[in-house]
Image (tube, helix red, strand yellow):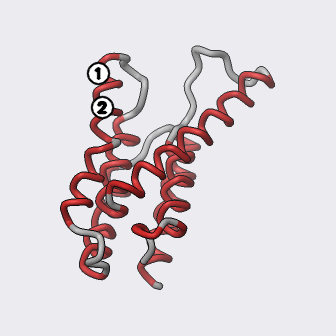
Amino acid sequence: MLLSFLIAVLLAVITITDFKTRTIPDILNLSLFLCGISVACLTPEVPVTDRLIGSVCVSVPLLLLTMVLPEAFGGGDIKLMAAAGFLLGWESTITAACIGIVLAGIYGSSLLITGKKTARDHFAFGPALCVGIAIALFLTPSGTL
């Protein structure tokens, strides 16, 4: 339970930090990864291979997309999904990413519709990813503690 609380606090801090600064400090992503190691020790039903695949199944496509379209995603978002992938395993990581993408799409659309941003403006993607990670962590079978 304490580990679940720590993960929730980390996700909240990442959300607030990214929303305010559009950056995710490496120490926060490293902390989430270390929580993933702890979770891996406590929940052996998610194999380490699934966790390693989870670390790359979303972060590598984000990295490749950013190499093709610079500024598509920030490095913090990529590292966040790598850390979350180890925490969750590959199935829940894909769930988290899908939820995050849908939420970011809704948020971005609302910014465009209200005229607060234009199509060329950027906004923080980390908060949407953190919500997706939290939902996947606590609601999907392979992500529960």
Residue on which the image places disc 1: 67
Q: Quadrant of residue 135?
A: bottom right
Q: Nearer the viewer, residue 83 or 96?
A: 96
The residue at the far left in this view is 49
Task: Note whether 10 is above or below 78 in the view shown.
Answer: below
The residue at the far bottom in this view is 1
Q: In the visual, does 61 lie left or right of 133? A: left
Can residue 29 be seen at all in this image of the molecule? no
Q: Residue at point 37% right, 56% down?
A: 84
Task: Note whether 107 is above or below 133 in the view shown.
Answer: above
Q: Where is residue 110 in the image (x, y as percent from the top left)?
A: 74, 30
Q: Counting other residues with Cα less than 10 Å from the Cα at mark 2, is it few (<14), some (14-19), or many (20 or more)?
A: many
Q: Residue at point 30% right, 82% down?
A: 42
Q: In the visual, does 102 lie left or right of 40? A: right
Indicate which disc residue 63 carries.
2
Q: Which of 103 and 74 is in front in this view?
A: 103
- Tag 1 near tag 2, CB within 8 Å: yes
Q: Position of residue 64 (x, y in %)?
A: 28, 27
Question: Quick one: quadrant of the C terminus?
Answer: bottom left
Q: Where is residue 98 in the image (x, y as percent from the top left)?
A: 50, 44
Q: Position of residue 120 (x, y in %)?
A: 58, 14
Q: Which of 145 and 78 is in front in this view?
A: 145
Q: Counting other residues with Cα less than 10 Å from the Cα at mark 1, is it few (<14), some (14-19), or many (20 or more)?
A: few
Q: In the image, what residue type sits under mark 1?
A: Met
Can residue 54 be seen at all in this image of the molecule? yes
- The residues bearing labels 1 and 2 have C-alpha atoms spaced at a distance of 6 Å
Q: In the visual, does 57 lie left or right of 144? A: left
SS class of the residue under badge 2?
helix
